[in-house]
Amino acid sequence: MKGIIMIIDGMADRPLKELDNKTPLEAAKTPNMDKMAKIGINGIMDPIKPGIRAGSDTSHISILGYDPYQVYTGRGPFEAAGVGIEVLPGDIAFRCNFSTASEEGLIIDRRAGRIREKTKQLASSLNSIQLEGFEDVEIIFKESTGHRSVLVLRGSGLSDQVSDADPKKEGKAPKEILGLDGSTEAEKTARVLNKFVSESYNILKDHPLNLERIEAGKPPGNIVLPRGAGAVPDVQPFNEKYGLKSACIAETGLIMGIGKLAGMDIIEVEGATGGADTDLDSISQSIIENASKYNFLLINIDGADEAGHDGNLQEKVNFLEKVDAVIGEVMKIPDTCFILTADHSTPISVMDHTGDPVPLVINGPEIRVDDVEKFDERSATKGGLCRIRGSDIMNILMDIMNKSEKFGA
Ligand code: ZN
Ligand code: ZN
């Protein structure tokens, strides 16, 4: 038997006046999700704990059966793994922006005019540089999407207890990075980072690509501002933990990075944008193709979360109706325990994640089907699973797949 966990990112919501007090999921026409509810067992799920506003990262970590309070030290490590850096436990990783600094050293554009093109060239001029006085620290630097990039520091005596360089506002100088816990490791890391930030300006300010941008009247990406420090955790590989052959199909670097750090194979989907305009047919195809190669798939589709963050009600409803077709395709995969849920609520009214529980349904052979007939936040509360936590999901899945060990005699 196969296991599939499909997460429609930020799908759950709160009742809206504009929808006669329905949620977007209650209002959307989703015949396949409703069919799953009818032939499955339903419930609601707190990704971490009741009322905790989970990030996409911490929620996925919890759903995969890891403790986010132990594993999650910051977003950096997951972003770094997501862009394909082979991170090692103990590495200190950061998310970075290419920004624009003026000659006076002030940040005049935090995103360097949302630079998109050729950031690979800028990044490779910073990768593997040696910082004077810190020859023992290896610098790994790689571009991500748009103005984003990732920095990894590798070496002994480093710490993730350091502040950010991003001043968050334009017209200010980069913040001096400070150690946060008074340790010599944090002090050293802060000095390394401050040196890296000033070196990034020295190297990038006259980079041919930036001279080209200035010529064209565009802000140059001439400085790098790190933030979101985290130490790469030492996690037990998912396949070893559960005896599965697993893969992760996701749209965003963050979720791919979680799969990567858990040792899963990462499947890149052509045409996946992470937005409402993503190529859902291409995602469907990739799921069907890979279902025959693996006995566990983690799938994340991101568009509903983006619509939620934008407060775009119509787009959220439309996207849920469109993604329903993908669910119809996944339902056809034989001999599968198929779990459909969300990683958190992203209510239109809040435009960010909240701690409201999310609906969850399981289909599969020998499932104790309950009386729920629709898949949404309120119908699911009447289901046979009642209220569970994200950390229960893998236990339940392994039990249904008859892959669990007995506890006791
Ligand atoms: Zn999410
Ligand atoms: Zn989100």
Image (cartoon, rainbow, N blue to C red):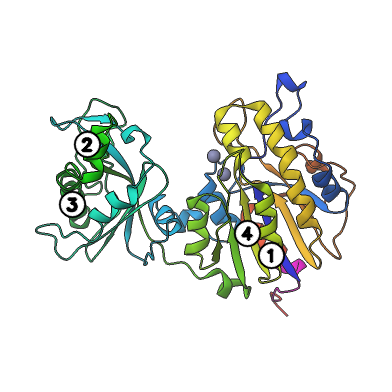
25 displayed left or right of 68: right
Under circle 3, the secondary element is helix
Q: Are marks 4 and 1 in contact (CB under 8 Å)?
A: no
Q: Position of residue 401 (x, y in %)?
A: 75, 70
Q: CA distance from mark 2 to mark 4?
A: 39 Å
Q: Earlier in the sequence, mark 2 or mark 1?
A: 2
Q: Which mark is residue 175?
A: 2
Q: Position of residue 220 (x, y in %)?
A: 26, 36
Q: Position of residue 147 (x, y in %)?
A: 36, 41
397 displayed left or right of 365: left
User: Can you identify the residue that label 4 sits on?
Assistant: 298
Under circle 4, the secondary element is strand
Question: In the rendered structure, which segment of residues is drawn in magenta?
Answer: 398-405
Q: Residues within 10 Å of mark 1 (few under 14, many from 20)?
A: few
Asked whether 128 falls inside the magenta stretch, the response is no
User: Can you identify the residue that label 1 sits on?
Assistant: 289
Q: Residues within 10 Å of mark 3 (few under 14, many from 20)?
A: many
Q: CA distance from mark 2 to mark 3?
A: 15 Å
Residue drawn at point x = 63 percent, y = 38 percent: 304
Task: Confirm whether residue 224 shows in the render.
Answer: yes
* Amino acid carrying mark 1 in the image: Glu
Residue drawn at point x = 78 percent, y = 20 percent: 20
Q: Which quarter of the figure has residue 378?
A: top right
User: Can you identify the residue that label 3 sits on?
Assistant: 187
Q: Are marks 2 and 4 in contact (CB under 8 Å)?
A: no
